[in-house]
């Protein structure tokens, strides 16, 4: 009996000790100042309205450590459909060259910045700042290293998210590369929406053997227009166009999957 009580007492002590240990985890936010579409109308699937789209988010850690590396993203703004056939394209290989091929100049649809913290895998308190420039390019082909991007971009179109280290920063990581992000048709709040989905390759998740943690994204897709057939009739549309909205505000939804496999979704309205 004495042994039994000793074991029970030991279990209680361990349980109390574990309860006092905080488990660090990523936190996500889609702030109002980083999102929005203009004009502010609704649009319809029959008559899409060309639009400019701003989207972004922030990532932090509950214990103020460097956030876990994120490997997958899904980004969708309610009632924003994409019409990549309305704009010029270049290939993924051209967008992914050491210096972006001039053939991609007319295919550029947006720009922005990504703020990162880099550091050793074994020390998440290490925060080496690395800010990069982002260029979004309308592409006609996917990344052969990720076969799903090839088939999906052939079917639905997508963007190359081109990342380059800002000149004049103290970023310890030389980055000049792109990743392929296909569009998928989905719904946000029941409204037809194009969702951008992509996986972060090792060359960006672990450049130079370090962990690279995104902490803030700010980007804008410009109102680039062209003509395509919409339900049998040729119309002027934008690369992104308004096709609907449920309420007075538009929801932006971002889904994150970190390197440990934890999946979380954050939303913002504007």
Image (tube, rainbow, N blue to C red):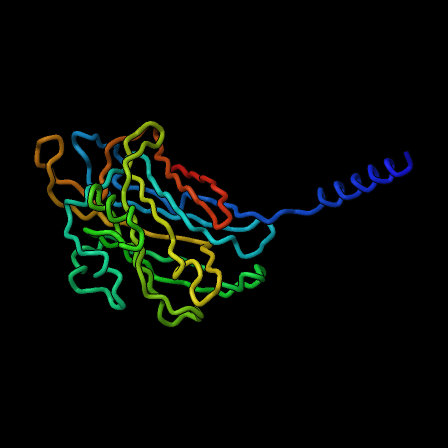
Residue 39, image quadrant:
top left
Q: Is residue 215 above or below residue 49?
A: below
Residue 253, image quadrant:
top left
User: How many badges with numbers are in the image?
Assistant: 0
Q: Nearer the viewer, residue 56 or 5?
A: 5
At 13% from the left and 30% from the top, the residue drawn is 231
Could you tell me residue 64's position as x and y percent? 58, 54
Determine the residue located farthest toward the right in the rendered image.
Answer: 2
Q: Considering the image in quadrants, where does the N terminus appear?
A: top right
18 relative to 50 in the view: left or right: right
At 43% from the left and 53% from the top, the residue drawn is 216
Q: Nearer the viewer, residue 143 or 19?
A: 143
Q: Nearer the viewer, residue 258 or 116?
A: 258
Q: Is residue 119 above or below residue 222?
A: below
At 55% from the left and 50% from the top, the residue drawn is 61
Could you tell me residue 17's position as x and y percent? 75, 45
Residue 113, image quadrant:
bottom left
Could you tell me residue 110's position as x and y percent? 26, 53
Q: Considering the image in quadrants, where does the C terminus appear?
A: top left
Could you tell me residue 151's position as x and y percent? 24, 45
110 relative to 235 in the view: left or right: right
């Amino acid at each position: 009996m004495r042994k039994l009580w000793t074991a029970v007492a030991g279990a209680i002590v361990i349980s109390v000790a574990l309860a006092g240990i905080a488990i660090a985890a990523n936190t996500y936010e889609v702030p109002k100042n980083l999102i929005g579409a203009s004009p502010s109308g609704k649009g319809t699937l029959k008559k899409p309205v060309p639009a400019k789209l701003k989207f972004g988010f922030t990532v932090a850690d509950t214990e103020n450590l460097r956030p876990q590396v994120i490997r997958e993203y899904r980004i969708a703004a309610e009632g924003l459909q994409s019409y990549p056939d309305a704009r010029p394209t270049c290939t993924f290989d051209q967008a992914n060259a050491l210096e972006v091929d001039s053939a991609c100049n007319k295919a550029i649809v947006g720009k922005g910045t990504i703020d990162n913290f880099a550091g050793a895998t074994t020390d998440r308190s290490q925060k080496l700042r690395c800010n990069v420039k982002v260029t979004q390019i309308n592409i006609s082909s996917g990344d052969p290293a990720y076969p799903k991007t090839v088939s999906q971009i052939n079917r639905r179109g997508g963007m190359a998210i081109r990342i380059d280290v800002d000149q004049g920063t103290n970023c310890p990581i030389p980055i000049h590369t792109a990743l392929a992000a296909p569009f998928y048709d989905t719904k946000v709040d029941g409204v037809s929406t194009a969702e951008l989905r992509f996986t972060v390759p090792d060359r960006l998740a672990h450049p130079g053997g370090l962990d690279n943690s995104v902490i803030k994204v700010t980007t804008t897709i410009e109102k680039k227009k062209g003509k395509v057939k919409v339900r049998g009739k040729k119309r002027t549309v934008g690369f992104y166009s308004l096709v609907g909205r449920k309420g007075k505000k538009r929801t932006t939804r971002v889904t994150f999957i970190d390197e440990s496999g934890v999946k979380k979704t954050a939303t913002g309205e504007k």
